[in-house]
Amino acid sequence: MFVRLWHIYYDGFSHLPGWGKMLVVIVLLKLFILFVVFKAFLMPNYLNTTYTTEQEKSEHVFYELIQKP
Amino acid sequence: MILELTTTSLVEWSRWQFAMTAIYHYMFVPLTLGLSFLLAMMETLWYRTGKVEWLHAAKFWMKLFAVNFAIGIATGLILEFQFGSNWSNYSWFVGDIFGAPLAIEGLFAFFLEATFFAVMFFGWERVSRRFHLLSTWMVFIGSNISALWILVANAWMQNPVGMEFNPLTARNEMVDFWAVLFSPTAMSKFFHTVTSAYTLSACFVIGVSGWFILKRRHLEFCRKSILLASVFGFCSILATMFTGDLSARDITRTQPMKLAAMEGLNEGGKGVDLTLIGLTVTDPALPSDRMYRVKYGIALPNMLSFLGYHDFDAYIPGVQDILNGYVSSDGTEYPSVEQRMANGRMAIAALKDYRKAVDEGDDAVAAQALQLLRTHFQDFGYGYLSSPEEVIPPIPLVFYSFRIMVGLGFLFLLLFVVAGWYAKKRKFACFRLIPYLAIVCVPLAYVASQCGWIVAEVGRQPWVVQHLMPTQVAITRIASGWVVTTFWMFAVLFTLLLIAELGIMFAQIRKGVKGAE
């Protein structure tokens, strides 16, 4: 089944019309911008990149919750 | 003072960024939800009758569906990135509950949808007719299941149920999955959102067909498409109105301030009127500059009470009543916001004391603090407010958005009736106003959808999690300049994507329907 699905994908992308190819380029560009530019460099997960353990993340948010008022 | 200004700016920019990306993302979503049903219906009609016109119609609309799907796919991920970068306190606070539906959505529904999408789009000559038809239906089911999980997560923020706050980890933990999934808020939100998406898709099909009619092209194709879409749209808009009623009844109980803002209602009472149209104006006589008075209003007597409780004499609280405290129609007593702020501050202090007592191994104090926290946790978020008036959302925006959404809903109802008649009677040579109306209704359907989301999301301000976490507590303390930079980058990216979508879609529409007369 997976081989058949692969063939559907492969043949489908090989015989795409012009507008379809343009769509594929846009999708790939978009995914590159989202995952490489935004996710990796501009919008990292603050807690995951600043703290290593769950305990540290919890401590940070706990501190924020009791400090904010 | 400077810190306060910086934080306000950070909160505002984070909100603007989320609002902007959510609005752009939702430009792609509704067409996927509804057009997939119409595709499946057209293909089913071809499969059952063998009439090749339905096949041509299915293939044409599938092309437009593919453009929308491809451009829109993964745009929602930006919202998830923002949870991690700009809203880290919120993400941690709600993590287990919000994360579960989103994870299910990502793993199950999205992959289901993406796999069958490939078969649907590429598989015409490569798989059996029956399997192709099944794939098309699975795309419809998959996209709608995706929407279910997202809307369940959103509904939990509007009405947090099925969870317990863990003071040791500072996060909420799910204790009842079914309560989260089947909460009345989740159900009314899901059905209202998808039926409105179906309405938008029906408007889209009728609008594009209207353009072909004006160009005197593919008239039989247009007739079939309009007939199917107008029946679908008619049923959908009625379902949208019915689910809107369910949603209004739910809001009356769970978010009365949102209802008061939707109506611009300052003083409530029994047998409250429903304002059809009116102008919100400031009035120095009102106790707060966040309150507005409705002038030149035309109202239906007692209808707001009826909508809220299906009882013409039911009590509906206004903004001032909610600030002062009130007893609802079902007998529940709600304290004043000032009292709730005091409760919230006690809950926050109890959280602090609990952790301190646990660290020091003082079990007696810990148990006492935990008891106090549990007693007042329902008002936890109020402890962060500086004044009671902060619970009032931006009334004019919510008031007008609600009226635009409802007014356009009635316009679409009229469109579906008129367009259905127009196509059935083949009146293409006359009544040229109808295709023009159909074309205008396409952007208006998007306006109505966005207005619905504005009512839902702006109307619940200042809460990101109702009663538990206000917006300013949810954000990450990062430089606001950074949020401003990424705001403009997202704005550019999404605008380019929208231009690309419109450009490719218009080009495909201009090319016309392959094989159709």
Image (cartoon, coloured by chain):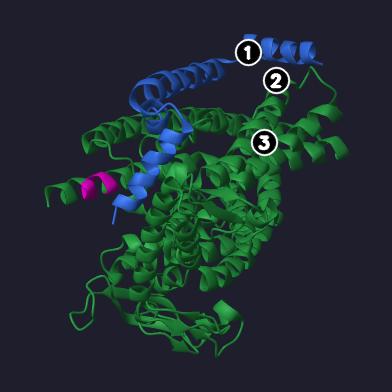
Q: From the image, which quarter does the C terminus of chain B lie in? A: top right
Q: Which residue is mark 3?
A: B109
Q: CA distance from mark 3 to mark 1?
A: 23 Å
- The subunit letter for the residue under badge 2 reads B
SS class of the residue under badge 2? helix
A56 displayed left or right of B227: left
Q: Amino acid at mark 1?
A: Phe
Give the number of marks.
3
Chain under label 1?
A: A
Q: Is residue A14 visible?
A: yes
Q: Which chain is green?
A: B
**Tag 1–tag 2 contact (CB < 8 Å):** yes
Report the span colored magenta.
B7-11
Residue B46 is one of the magenta-drawn residues: no
Residue at 33%, 40% in the rendered image: B476
Instruction: Give the labeled residue for mark 1.
Output: A13
Amino acid type, label 2 = Phe
Q: Quadrant of residue B490?
A: top left
Kind of residue sitting beneath label 3: Ala
Q: Nearer the viewer, mark 3 or mark 1?
A: 3
Q: CA distance from mark 1 to mark 2?
A: 8 Å
Cα gap from disc 2 to disc 3, whole angstroms: 20 Å
Q: Is residue B338 above or below residue B239?
A: below
State the residue at coordinates (57%, 72%). Answer: B249
